[in-house]
Amino acid sequence: MRIGVVGSGYVGLVSGACFADFGHDVTCVDIDEEKTAALNRGEVPIFEPGLDTLIERNVAAGRLAFTTDLAGTVRASDVVFIAVGTPSRRGDGHADLSYVESAAREIGAAIEGFTVVVTKSTVPVGTGERVEEIIREANPDADFAVVSNPEFLREGAAISDFKRPDRIVIGSDDPRALEVMREVYRPLFLNKSPVVEMNRSSAELAKYASNAFLATKIAFINEIADLCEKTGADVQNVAHAIGLDKRIGPKFLHAGPGYGGSCFPKDTLALLKTAQDYEVPQLIVESVVSSNDKRKRAMGRRIVHAIGDNARGKKVAILGLTFKPETDDTRDSPAIAIIQALQDAGANVSAYDPQGVEQASKVLSHVDYASSPYEAAEDAEAVVIVTEWDEFRALDLSRIRDCMRDLVLVDLRNIYHRQEVERLGMKYVAVGR
Ligand code: UGA
C-alpha cells in the first residue's frame, strides 16, 4: 500500500514508521520545513523509546520518506492518514479542528483516483462527516471515502502499542474503504489482533469514551486513596483486591498525584463539550475532571503540610517533571501544578528530571534545575517523587538523607516502602497508605 501521513507530530511519526515497518510505502508530510529537513537528516524531534531506530531502519530500506509536498504525496497514495494536532480550543475546551479542516481541504484538492482518507487524530464525533463535506467542496469529482481509525498509543510505549494493540478500531460503512484498511493492517490481522469495524461515529466516540473511562478509573482510585488515609487502609492492597476481579481489571488503579499529559485532560474536556452540544449530561466525566483538577492542587498542600505547614523560604526538591516516565512531555503534568502551588506558598523549588527539563522550563520560572536527584536534594526540607522514572526507584536514600536539611520524603507514586524510609530516620509521606 502507498500511504501518506499528514502531520509529522507524535501520532504521525509513530504511525508512519510502524506502517513502513509493516512493509508499506510511507510518506510523512508536514508543513514545517525545518522539522522535515531535520527528519531527513535522521534527527527525530520527539522522545519516544525505539522510534529513532525504527525510522532509521525504514528510511534506509526506502520505505519511509519525509516531505512538505502534500499534494504530491496525496496523488501518489492509496490511503492518506490525517494525524495533525487537535489541541483544546483556547477558552472553551472544544477540540480545535482547524488543522484537521485545513488538511482535509488540501487533501481534497489533490485527490486523484480512489483515495481513502483516514482521521487518526482524536476528533469529536461528527468530524468525519465534516471532513467528507470539505473534501467534496474542494473537489466535487473526487472518488474517496472518509474513515475513522483512532489511535490508542501511550506515550513511552507507543511502538509496542501500535504493533501489539489491544484492538484496532475502524469506522466506515464503505466496503471499498474497509478493504483498503484491512490491507493496511494486514500484518496485525495475521497476529490475530482484534480488528473491530463499526460506523464512523461509533469509532470516533469509542476513542473519547476509552480515554474518559481510563481517566475515571484513575480519579476513582485517587479518591479511594484519600479515604484509605483517613481509615487506616492501604490503597495498594485495596487496588490489588478489586483489580483481581476480572470485571474491573488491575490496570489504571495506581493512586498518584492525578493524571496529566496531552490526552486525558484535553479529551475529557472535549467529550464534555460534545455532550453539552447534544444536551446529554455526562455527570461522571464532569466529576472526574473536577476531581483531578482539585487533586493536583491538593498535592501541593500535602507537601506544605509535610514540612510543617509553612513553606516560606524552604527548599523543596521535585523529582520528576513529566506527566509520566519515558517521555519528555510535561503538558498538564501534575508536577507543574505542584511546583506552582509550592512557589505560591513561598517555597524555593529545585527539580530534576531525566527528560522533561526543556519543556518544563518553558512554563515554569524560578526553578533551580539540577543534574541529578542528589544535587536537587541538597539542603532541601523535602524531596518529592512526582514521576515514577525507573531511576527514582533505586535511589541511594542514605545519600539523599545526608544532603538534606530536613528529612521528609513525599512519595506521590508509592514506589518506596514506609519501613525502608523510616529505618533511615526519614519521615515518609505516601498516597493512600
Ligand atoms: C493515554 C491512553 O492511555 C492511550 O490509550 C491513548 O491512546 C492516549 O492517551 C491518547 O489519547 O493519545 P498517555 O496520555 O500517553 O495515553 O498516558 P497514560 O499512560 O494513559 O497515562 C496518563 C496519565 O495517567 C499519567 O499522568 C499517568 O501517571 C496517570 N496514571 C495512569 C495514573 O495516575 N494512575 C494509573 O494507574 C495510570
Image (cartoon, rainbow, N blue to C red):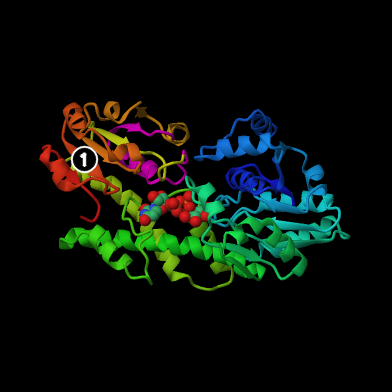
Give the image location of residue 256, x and y in percent.
Answer: 32, 52
Viewer can see residue 345: no
The amino acid type, in three-letter code, at marker 1 is Leu
Would you say 369 lies left or right of 21 here? left
Would you say 380 lies left or right of 333 here? left
Would you say 270 lies left or right of 63 here? left
User: Which residues are the magenta region?
Assistant: 328-355
Q: Mark 1 points at which residue?
A: 409
41 in the magenta segment: no
Would you say 179 lies left or right of 250 here? right
Give the image location of residue 365, x and y in percent.
Answer: 40, 31
Image quadrant where residue 215 sits: bottom left
Image quadrant where residue 380 sits: top left
Locate the C terminus by quadrant.
bottom left
Q: Residue at x 68, y 62 (%)?
A: 182
342 in the magenta segment: yes
Q: Which residue lies furthest to the right in this view?
A: 141
* Position above or below: 308 against 240: above
Give the image location of residue 250, x and y in percent.
Answer: 35, 62
Viewer can see residue 433: yes
* Along the viewing direction, whichever of 44 and 285 lies nearer the viewer: 44
Q: Which residue is drawn at 28% across and 34% down?
A: 317
Give the image location of residue 33, x and y in percent.
Answer: 70, 32
